[in-house]
Image (cartoon, rainbow, N blue to C red):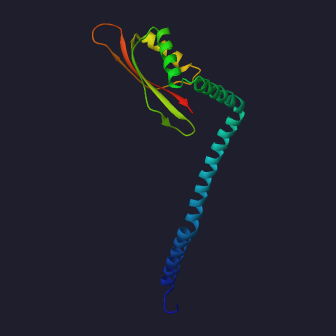
Amino acid sequence: MTMLSSRERKILFLTAGVVLLGLLYHFLIEPFFTKWQDVSKEIQTAEVRLQKTRLLLRKRSEIEKRFQRYAGALEKVEGSGGGITAVLQEVEALAQKSRLKVLGMRPLPKRQKEFFQEQGLEVNAQGTAPQFARFIYDLLGSPNALKIEKLELSSTSGKTPLLKAFIVVTTLTQ
C-alpha cells in the first residue's frame, strides 16, 4: 500500500467498495427481496382462497339444499329403474311440449367423472328458433339435472324458418 499513490489508493478503495456492494447485492439483498416477493404472492393467493372459502361458507346451507335436490333427483331417476330411459322420456316430453319434431335420439356410453358417472344422449330435432328456445329453457330447468353439453343449430335449405339441431344432453348417474 505504501507504494501506491493517493490517487491509486482511492481508485483501489473505490473498486473494492463497488465489488463489495455488488457481492452484497447479488448474494444478500436480491435473494431477500425475491423471497419477499414470493411470500407476498403466496399471501395474496391465500387471502383470495380464504375470501372464496368464506363466501362458500356463507352460502353453505344454500349449496347443501341444492346438493340434496340434485341427489334426490338422481335417486329418483335411479330408483325408478329407468336411468337413461327416464331421461329419454323426459327429453321426448319436453320436445313435444315445445312442439319440436324429434328426428332421432341415441344414448351415449357412460363416462366416469370424479364421484359420479355421466350419461349422455344425442338428440336430432327440427323446429323454429322460438321452439328451440323454449325447449332449451325447459331442459335446463329440469329436476333431473340435465345439462346441454353441445348444441349445433343449422338452417334447413330453402326459405323455411325451420332449424335443425344436434344436441348432446348429459345427466349424472351413480
**Picture quadrant where residue 61 is located:** top right
Q: Where 4 falls versus 79 (above or below)?
A: below
Residue 75 rendering spot, x and y as whole percentages: 62, 27
- Does residue 136 appear anywhere in the picture? no
Which residue lies at the image location 53% right of the left edge and 24% below the top edge? 146
The one nearer the camera, 170 or 3, is 170
Residue 169 rendering spot, x and y as whole percentages: 47, 24
Q: Where 34 falls versus 88 (above or below)?
A: below
Q: Where 131 falls versus 67 (above or below)?
A: above
Which residue lies at the image location 55% right of the left edge and 68% below the top edge? 25
Which residue lies at the image location 28% right of the left edge and 12% below the top edge? 157
**Picture quadrant where residue 121 is located:** top left
Which residue lies at the image location 54% right of the left edge and 75% below the top edge? 20
Residue 2 rendering spot, x and y as whole percentages: 52, 92
Residue 155 rendering spot, x and y as whole percentages: 33, 15
Quadrant in which the C terminus is drawn: top right
Toward the front, the furthest residue is 81
Q: Is residue 58 left or right of residue 79?
A: right
The one nearer the camera, 81 or 49, is 81
- Does residue 166 appear anywhere in the picture? yes
Q: Is residue 137 left or right of residue 47?
A: left
